[in-house]
Image (tube, grey):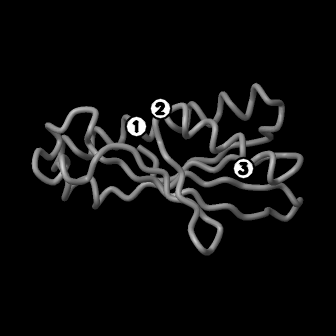
């Protein structure tokens, strides 16, 4: 599974960020804007996750980073980024599996939201 998913977005950068937030919210994530303008997208409960690990069910905490930058053509790029090590410490192999599944679902939600808005020009996984 990829460790990042880049969406290249045409049009107004602020409007694109609202679409990205909407896609994340649709997957149950709350967006926290960081001082550098990038985001943390979180869902679940850290306390429950630390006590129950991967058995925390829907309360298993998952955090993705979302970085924004502009490419050479002036398009906004939104990068959904995951950190596998955190999942391992939270829930071992099962935690990694939960994070991989959530990452795939969230990348698909980003893709569908941006595509249906007519602003997605390309995607890259890595």
Q: Are marks 2 and 3 in contact (CB under 8 Å)?
A: no
Which label's residue is closer to the chain start, 1 or 3?
Answer: 3
User: Could you say where residue 115 lies in the image, as x and y percent from the top left?
Assistant: 74, 30
Which class describes the residues within 10 Å of circle 1: few (<14), some (14-19), or many (20+)?
some
Image quadrant holding the N terminus, namely top left
Q: Nearer the viewer, residue 37 or 92?
A: 37
Disc 2 from disc 3: Cα separation: 19 Å
Residue at the spot of label 2: 105
Q: What label does residue 79 carry, if any?
A: none
Q: Nearer the viewer, mark 2 or mark 3?
A: 3
Q: Are marks 1 and 2 in contact (CB under 8 Å)?
A: yes
Residue 12 visible? The answer is yes
Placement of 101 over or under 5, stated as above or below: above
Q: Is residue 97 left or right of 121 when viewed as pictured? A: left
Local secondary structure at mark 2:
helix
Which label's residue is closer to the chain start, 2 or 3?
Answer: 3
Residue at the spot of label 1: 102
Disc 1 from disc 2: Cα separation: 5 Å
Residue at the spot of label 3: 17
Q: Is residue 18 left or right of 125 when viewed as pictured? A: right
| Residue at image coords 53%, 58% | 32
């Amino acid at each position: 599974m990829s460790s990042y998913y880049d969406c290249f977005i045409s049009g107004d950068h602020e409007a694109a960020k609202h679409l990205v937030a909407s896609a994340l919210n649709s997957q149950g994530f709350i967006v926290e804007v960081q001082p550098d303008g990038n985001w943390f997208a979180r869902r679940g409960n850290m306390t429950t996750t630390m006590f129950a690990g991967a058995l925390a069910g829907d309360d298993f905490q998952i955090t993705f980073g979302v970085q924004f930058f502009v490419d050479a053509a002036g398009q906004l790029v939104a990068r959904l980024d995951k950190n596998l090590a955190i999942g391992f410490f939270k829930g071992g192999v099962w935690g990694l599996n939960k994070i991989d599944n959530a990452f795939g679902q969230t990348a698909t939600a980003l893709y569908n939201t941006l595509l249906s808005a007519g602003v997605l020009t390309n995607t890259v996984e890595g």
